[in-house]
Image: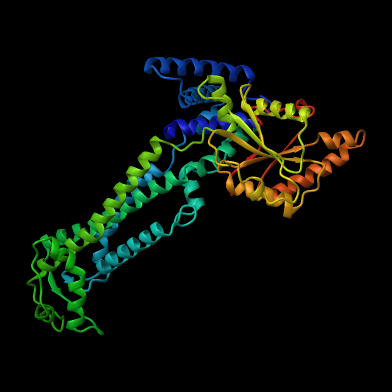
Amino acid sequence: MNERTARDVVLMRAIETADTKREILSEDDRVYASRSARELAHWQAAEGKSEPRLDHFLGQRAELILKRLAERTPAFAAFRQRRSVLPLLAVLLPIVGFLAGAGLDRIGNPHRVDLLSAPLLLIVAWNLLVYVVLIVWTLVPAKRTGWASPQLLRRLSVGKAALPRKLPAPLAAGIAQYFAEWSQLTAKLTHLRLARTIHLAAATFALGAIASLYARGVLTQYAAGWESTFLGAEQVHALLSFLFAPALAVFPLQGFSLADVQALHFVQEASPAGGARWVHLYAATLFLLVVLPRLVLAIVSALRARHVAHRFPLDLGQPYYRLLADRVGASGPAVLRVIPYSFTVDEARHKGLAAVAAMVLGEQAQLMLRPSCSYGEEPKDALRDARLDDADVAITAALFNLAATPERENHGAFLDYLAHNTPRGIAVLLDESGLVERSAGHADTRLVERVALWHQFCQYHHTQATVVDLLHPERHPLDLGSGLAVSGAA
């Protein structure tokens, strides 16, 4: 799936899940989009003599749904026309860099080449420092995106967070959810594109300085020399030998000796002879140490960004997509793995869990019920034979009895272990059936208090809870719109 298709699919998912009451997308709209997209996906599969692909189906379905919403809501149509500011920056920053570099060396005397030119030395020193930092970040990866802040990446990815006016409430909520999700999904891609742009701008900055040196040399007779309060000819010679070593090693340029450096000391008015030699040396040094490495880094970032954009990492194993895959026949049955904690699941509740799996993952969903983890038992020991990274499992859910009192050292430790070791994140199921049975006629107040307690507890452990009644699953319907609250791995 490419980036454009993934963007439409994520936007469709955000809007569809926010519209739980079918206010902006009726059931007929959804069924029509699914049926039409399924036919197109099967037609494409027949053309290629292959099985129907889920990404084709999702892309076609998203296009149909978003097009219909745009026809009904002009404000949403205008929102879809928004474009990221990053492509504009990719053009403007290199141009600005070239112009800034062209004007930088004019800070000094325009009629002489200063061997200790501060602007040119700073360009080289700054870029060498950047290379060192990049190497360190490569060897010791920084958290998230390194030097680019999440706020900057979000702004570059989705633009202004302000919602369009005159939008229905469910549509506005869906777009807000899209902003949050898409900025996270595209953080790596945006970072690569921003890095490409900055590397190009740095290269053009150095090119501007080089172009300025040669352009002024055509119309001006350069006087070459140096002056310093603290450095002598020997120190300047050593510094320039180190600085120009790469250029002298690669290009057939005229070198210099200590006597040459001594003769160019600005004790009195300098001779205009010999300026071209130092222009060539500085230009070659900037090209080798700045322009060439920056262009290589820009190309690498561009190729990596292109790879990510053409193979966008959208996890189609999430419940929403697995249910749609069940409808198109593009995937095998989805699996809901349930791990009870201090909870014995009898036959009636087992059927309730199967009903929950069908509601969330489709009629073909399968239930994988693990043995219950005993109270006080170490999660590592209880789950030592469980493959928590099993790619065939769509959702891993921890099951608790709502009547139990959550404890940080037991229930909390169980949740933390699951969250840290399950790549796709976990869901939390709270079964209210036992509490309802024991509190007949007085359940409302106790239920509200107990649910609030568990929600607060789960939030503390960076998870979200979903209340179910395993004896009467229909009391808490879970469908494509609501689904289970799945929290990402810590």
Residue 12 percent across, percent down from the top left = 55, 29
In the rendered structure, the answer to whether residue 473 lies left or right of residue 91 reads: right
Residue 234 percent across, percent down from the top left = 17, 82
Q: Nearer the viewer, residue 238 or 176?
A: 238
Relative to residue 318, is residue 263 depicted above or below? below
Quadrant in which the N terminus is drawn: top left
Q: Nearer the viewer, residue 363 or 218?
A: 363
In the rendered structure, the answer to whether residue 480 lies left or right of residue 104 reads: right
**Number of marks in the rendered image:** 0
Task: Work out whether residue 115 can be spotted.
Answer: no
Residue 217 percent across, percent down from the top left = 13, 62
Q: How is the image coloured?
A: rainbow
Q: Quadrant of residue 164?
A: top right
Q: Quadrant of residue 238?
A: bottom left
Residue 390 percent across, percent down from the top left = 55, 38
Q: Residue at left 76%, top 43%?
A: 342
In the rendered structure, the answer to whether residue 242 lies left or right of residue 218 reads: right
Q: Residue at left 45%, top 54%?
A: 148
Relative to residue 325, is residue 198 depicted above or below? below
Q: Nearer the viewer, residue 490 or 179?
A: 490
Relative to residue 123, is residue 435 depicted above or below? above
Relative to residue 115, is residue 354 depicted above or below? above
Q: Residue at left 50%, top 19%?
A: 37
Q: Residue furthest right?
A: 441
Q: Quadrant of residue 76?
A: top right
Q: Nearer the viewer, residue 238 or 107?
A: 238
Task: Work out whether residue 206 can be spotted.
Answer: yes
